[in-house]
Image (cartoon, helix red, strand yellow):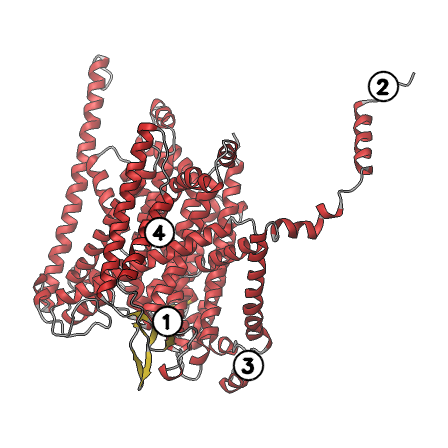
Amino acid sequence: MAHDGPPRQALAAALGSLVVRSLAVQVATAVVVAALVYLLVSNAAENLVRQGIASGFGFLRHEAGYDVGETWIQHSARNTYAHTLFVGFLNTLYVSVLGIAFATLLGIVVGVARVSRNWLIARLSAVYVEVFRNTPLLLQIVFWYTVMRQLPPPRQALHPFEGVFLSNRGLVHAIPVWTPVHGWMLAALLVGVGASLALGYWSRRRREATGASTPVLWPSLALVLGLPVGAWLLGGAPSAVDLPALRGFNFRGGATHSPEFVALLTSLVAYISAFIGEIVRAGIQAVAIGQREAARSLGLREGLILRLIVIPQALRVIVPPLTSQYLNLVKDSSLAVWIGYPDLVSVANTAINQTGQAVEGIVIMMTVYLTISLSISLFMNWYNSRVALRG
Amino acid sequence: MPAAPSPAAALAERRARARAALPPPVERVGALRWMRDNLFSSLANTLLTLLTVAALALVVPPILMWAFVGSVWYPPDPEVCRAATGACWAVIVEKHRVMFFGLYPYAEHWRPFLAVILYVVAVALTCWRRCWSWQVLVPLWAASLAAIVVLMLGGIFGLTVIDTGQWGGVPLTMVVFTATVTLGLPLGVVLALGRRSEMPVIRLLSVLFIEFIRAVPLVTILFCAAVVFPLFLPPGWNVDKMVRVLIGMGIFYGCYFAEVIRGGLQAIPRGQYEAAASLGLSYWRTTRKIILPQALRIVIPGLMNHIISAFKNSTLVIIVGLFDLLNATGAAVADPLWIRYYTEGYLFVAAVYFVGAFALSKYSQQLERWLAEGRRY
C-alpha cells in the first residue's frame, strides 16, 4: 500500500518513481529515434544498391561535365564536381551579399519614409511595404525573369542612361578601367577605416579619462573618403571608363549581369526591403518621445540627438529581427533554382540529376546553408551584444 | 433669492456657451490646414511633396491608361489585343480555367470549383468569432476536408478517380496551405513542449531538430521530400509525391511555429505551474488545461505571421513539379499566342495572392484587438 510507510519514505518513493519514469521516457525516446535512423539508413543503403547508385562523396573528384553560366573563378566543364559546387556557393554568396546591402539601404529609406511627417511620402512608403510584403517572393522572381526575357534583343536594347543597356541578354553597364591606382585606392580606404576606428577608440578613452570631447564623425568621414580620393588624385586621376558598345549581336565591354541574376536580385531586394522597412519603423517608433524631448531640454543639437539618443536605442529593437531577415534573404536566394541562376542549389541539383546521388547532394546543400546561417547568427549575436543594454 | 443652479443645469449652460463660442479661424481647420501640416510643413517637406507629385504625375496616368482606357477584356482574341493600346486582360478570360484548375481534366472542373467554394465557406466560418468552439470547428473542418478530398480525388459516388498528379491551380494551393498549417501546428506544440522539457534527451533532440530545419532553405526540405525520401522507405513502399511534399511543408513550418509557441510558454508565470502542481495535476493535465490555453492565446499574432508566410511560400511546391496557381499561370501565359501578355497574367495572380495575404494580415490585427479585450488589467 502506498500510504503505509512514514511520509519521508513515501516522498522518496514518489521522487524515485518520478526520476525512474523520466529516465525511462528519455531512454525510450532515444532508442526509438536511434532505431528509426537505423531503419531509414539501412533502407537507403539497400535501395541504393538495388538501383545501382554509388554512395559516398567520391563523385566530388569526378569531372562534372557541365558549364556554369556565371563564375567568379576560373571554371570549365572539365573541372570536378567539388570545384563546380564551389562556383555555385560563390554565386550564392555574391547574390546574398549584394542583396543584404541593397535591401538594408532601401529598407532604411522605406522605414524612415513611413514615419515621415510628409503624408504623401508616408503613404507611398506604406503602399510599397504592403505590395511587396504580401506578394509571394517566387511570383516576383518569375515575373521579373519573364520581364527580362521579353526585353528586346541587344540591337534594340533599352538605353535609359549613358552606359547602361537593358536587353534580353541582361543588364550591361559601364565600369572604370582597372588600373594599379585603384588598388592603391582600396589600400587607402582600408587605412582610412583603420585610422577612424583608432580615432574613435582614442577619443572614447580621452573622454572617459578627462571628460573632454573630440570630434570624431567628420574627421572619420574625411579619413574614409578623403584618403582614397587623395590616392586617386596622386595617381593622376585615371578616369578611363569601359563603356559597353554593341558589336555584332551582343555587347562588348562594361560589366554584364545575366537576366537571371537581375531578376533574382531585384525580387530579393524588393521583398526583403519591405520587411526591413517595417523593422526600421518599429525601431524608430519604439524610442519614447520623452527621450527626444529630454535631449532637447538638455540643449543637444538635432544631429547629436539622433546619433546619441535615438539611433542607439532604436538599434536595440532593430538588430534581432534584422538578423532573421538577413538569414531569410540568404535562404530565399535558393529560389534561384527555378529560373536557373547558378547558385549552390541549382548547381547541386544538376549534379544530383547527373550522378543520381541525391542524398549526398542534399547533405552538401544543407551543410553549406547550416554553416552560412550559423555564421550570420554568431556575427549578429556578437553585434547585438554590443548594442544591447549592459548589466 | 434664486436657488443655486443644479449641477445638471450648470453643465447644460456650460455646453450651450461652448456651442455659442466662435469657430476656430479658417486657417486652423479644414483641408488647407491639413495640407500645411502634412505636406508643406517646411521648405524641405514642400520640395519633397512637389517632387513626389511630379513623379506620380509622370508615372501614374500612363499606367492607368494602360490598365483601363486602352485595355481589352473581351473578346479573348490575341489579334484584338495586338491592335489595342492598353492591357490585354482578355488573356485571363481566355486562360482562367487553366490558371485556376491546372491539369485537372477539363470536363471535371466543377469538382475543384465546388471544393474551393466549400473551402472558402469553411474559412469564413472559422474567422467568425461565433464559431470559435471545438464543438463547431472540429466537425466543420472534418466534414469539409473529407468532402474536398472526395470531390478532388473521386473514386466513390460514381466520381472518376483523379490522381493527385493532375491536381492543380487554386485547389492545390489551398490543399498545400491547409495541410501545412494543420500538420505544422500540432508538430509546433510538441516541439515547443519538447524544447521546454526538463528531460535533457528530449530537450536536446527538439533543439537539434528545430535549429537544423530553421537553418536550411525550404527548397532543400522540398527536395528531400520529393527526391530523397523515397530512398529511405522500405523497398516496394510508395508514398504519393504530393503527400510527401505536404509533410515536408508541415515539418518546415512546424519548427517555425514551435519557436513562436515556445515564446508563449516562457511568458506563462511560474505561479501557474506551481498552482497546478499544488492541485496535484499531472504534467499532461497541467499542460493541456492550464498552460497551453494561455500560451497559445498569447502567440496567435506571432503564429499568424508564419501562417501568412506559409500562404505565400505554398508557391515553392512548383520547384518540385506541382502545378499550383503560380505554375498553372506560368504554363498558361507560355502559350506562344499569348506570351506577349504575360504581365497581365502575372499581375492578376499577384493580385489574387495579395488579396489573400493582405486579408490574413488585416484579420490578424483584428484578432489581436479581440484577444486584447479580455486582458485589460
Q: Are discs 2 and 4 both within one chain?
A: no
Within the image, what quadrant is residue B283 found in? top left
Task: Please state the horizontal and vertical placement of residue A24, each as a whole percent of the image.
Answer: 17, 34
Circle 1 Cα neighbour tier, 10 Å, few/some/many (<14 / 14–19 / ≥20): many
Q: CA distance from mark 3 to mark 2?
A: 80 Å
Q: CA distance from mark 2 to mark 4?
A: 69 Å
Depth check: give the residue in front, B242 or B259: B259
Residue A67 relative to residue B285: left or right? left
Residue that label 1 marks: A145
Examine the rendered structure and indicate whether residue B180 appears above or below residue A347: above
Q: Amino acid at mark 3?
A: Thr
Within the image, what quadrant is residue A94 found in? bottom left
Examine the rendered structure and indicate whether residue B169 appears above or below residue B22: below
Residue that label 3 marks: B85
Residue that label 4 marks: A325
Residue B4's tag is: 2
Task: Please state the horizontal and vertical placement of residue A259, each as a whole percent of the image.
Answer: 33, 72
Q: Amino acid at mark 4?
A: Gln
Examine the rendered structure and indicate whether residue A203 appears above or below residue A281: above
Circle 3 Cα neighbour tier, 10 Å, few/some/many (<14 / 14–19 / ≥20): some
Instruction: Tell me which numbered mark, 4 or 1, is placed earlier along the sequence.
Output: 1
> In what element is the residue under mark 1?
helix
Residue A313's tag is: none
Q: Amino acid at mark 2?
A: Ala
> In what element is the residue under mark 3?
loop
> In what element is the residue under mark 2?
loop
